[in-house]
């Protein structure tokens, strides 16, 4: 197989994001026929159809989605190669200031309560490093999928207690363990008798066994799309919710938090990145700050364990 050239990788990414050969051509300042030729060349080299063409534009096949993910990751490495080489020539090395962009994907509660102090210290240490943070719902492939598909350099992700990384091929390291707790209206005499409010990202894979043993937990009567909405409903007296501790940080007035007993359900939160990007200065600097993060109450440090 002949290797794909960088311009072919850029064409694959543009077609995937624009969902149109014509729009991709405009974005790349070239012609539609040149884009079509480049896609056909990629398909020939890879031995697979990468895009389905039709009235609704161009959509990636399963093989195409995988190819685009690799294309983004390779283009990202090409982008960081120049600055890293120049830093090495200048003698900055790993201990010097880091410059460039750093793309981070995080689920909402981690982005709201854990990232700000980390990014503040990072900015003080490396003022030339510009973080770009994207909030990603922790559903399906979640933040790990953003990293695997080349849209983020590092993702803050929920991790299974002992299983493999959320997406194969990534480096996954646990940072802390957080327990779940019961959120309910303040001063309610019997909070466990309230209706259950649930939310879409409540990571039931980590709580399923515990949940099935709780005969006091009814089926959810309300399911919110966002944890802040679920907590607002609870604070207004509309129900109770079982939530991870990170989501409970900065809880609204009128809401109380009660432990779920001596053995509550819990989950790990950590970071995921690619093996190639794990060694780049920007990602290394971010990982150092994440590991030094003082943990709020209800969160306990996890032994660093690469999955």
Image: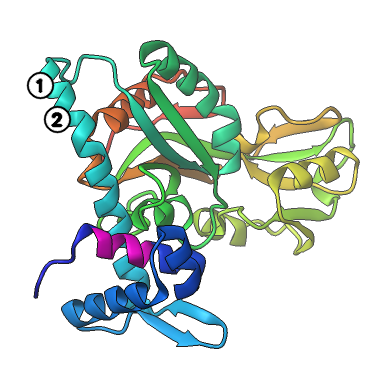
Graded by Cα atoms within 10 Å as few (under 14), some (14 to 19) or many (20 or more), the crowding at tag 1 reads few
The answer to whether residue 305 shows anywhere in this view is yes
Q: Is residue 202 positioned above or below 218 on the image? A: above
Question: In which quarter of the view is residue 172 placed?
Answer: top left
Disc marking residue 85:
2
Q: Check residue 173 for magenta coloring.
A: no
Please say which color scheme the image uses: rainbow
Q: Is residue 233 above or below residue 216?
A: above
| Residue 210: % across, % down | 56, 54
User: Where is residue 247 shown, x and y percent of the image?
Assistant: 63, 38
Residue 262 showing in the rendered view: no
Question: Who's the residue at 38% across and 62% down the image?
Answer: 13
Q: Relative to 202, is 268 on the left or the right?
A: left
Q: Residue at x 26, y 60 (%)?
A: 7
Task: Give whichever of 156, 60 is nearer the camera.
Answer: 60
Where disc 2 sits, the SS reads helix
Crowd rating for badge 2 (residues with CA inside 10 Å; few <14, some 14–19, many 20+): few
As measured in the structure, the alpha-carbon distance from the residue carrying label 2 to the one carrying label 1 is: 6 Å
Q: Quadrant of the N terminus?
A: bottom left
Mark carried by residue 89: 1
Q: Residue at x 59, y 28 (%)?
A: 113
Q: Which residues are magenta?
A: 7-13
**Which residue appears farthest toward the bottom when viewing the image?**
54
Circles 2 and 1 in contact, beta carbons < 8 Å: yes
Residue furthest to the top? 124
Image position of 140 with respect to 304: above or below:
below
Q: Would you say the magenta stretch is mainly helix, strand or loop?
A: helix
Residue 11 in the magenta stretch? The answer is yes
* Image-based side of 186 in relation to 151, left or right: right
Name the foreground residue: 225 vs 150. 150
């Amino acid at each position: 197989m002949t290797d794909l050239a960088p311009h072919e990788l850029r064409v694959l990414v543009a077609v995937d994001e624009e969902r149109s050969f014509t729009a991709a051509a405009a974005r790349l300042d070239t012609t539609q026929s040149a884009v079509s030729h480049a896609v056909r060349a990629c398909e020939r080299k890879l031995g697979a159809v990468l895009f389905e063409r039709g009235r609704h534009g161009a959509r990636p096949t399963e093989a195409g989605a995988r190819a685009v993910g690799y294309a983004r990751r390779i283009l990202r490495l090409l982008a960081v190669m120049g600055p890293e080489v120049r830093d090495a020539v200048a003698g900055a090395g790993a201990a010097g200031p880091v410059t460039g962009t750093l793309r981070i994907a995080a689920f909402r509660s981690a982005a709201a309560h854990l990232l700000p102090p980390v990014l503040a210290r990072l900015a003080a240490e490396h003022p030339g490093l510009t973080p770009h943070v994207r909030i990603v719902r922790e559903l399906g492939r979640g933040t790990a999928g953003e990293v695997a598909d080349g849209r983020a350099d590092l993702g803050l992700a929920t991790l299974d207690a002992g299983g493999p990384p959320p997406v194969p091929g990534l480096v996954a390291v646990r940072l802390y363990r957080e327990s779940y707790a019961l959120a309910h209206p303040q001063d309610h005499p019997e909070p466990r008798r309230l209706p259950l409010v649930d939310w879409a990202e409540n990571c039931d894979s980590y709580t399923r066994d515990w949940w099935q043993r709780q005969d006091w937990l009814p089926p959810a009567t309300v399911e919110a799309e966002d944890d802040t909405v679920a907590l607002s409903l609870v604070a207004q007296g509309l129900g109770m919710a079982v939530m991870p501790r990170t989501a409970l940080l900065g809880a609204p007035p009128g809401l109380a938090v009660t432990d779920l007993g001596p053995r509550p359900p819990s989950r790990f939160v950590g970071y995921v990145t690619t093996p190639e990007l794990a060694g780049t200065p920007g990602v290394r600097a971010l990982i150092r700050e994440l590991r030094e993060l003082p943990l709020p109450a209800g969160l306990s440090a996890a032994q660093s364990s690469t999955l």
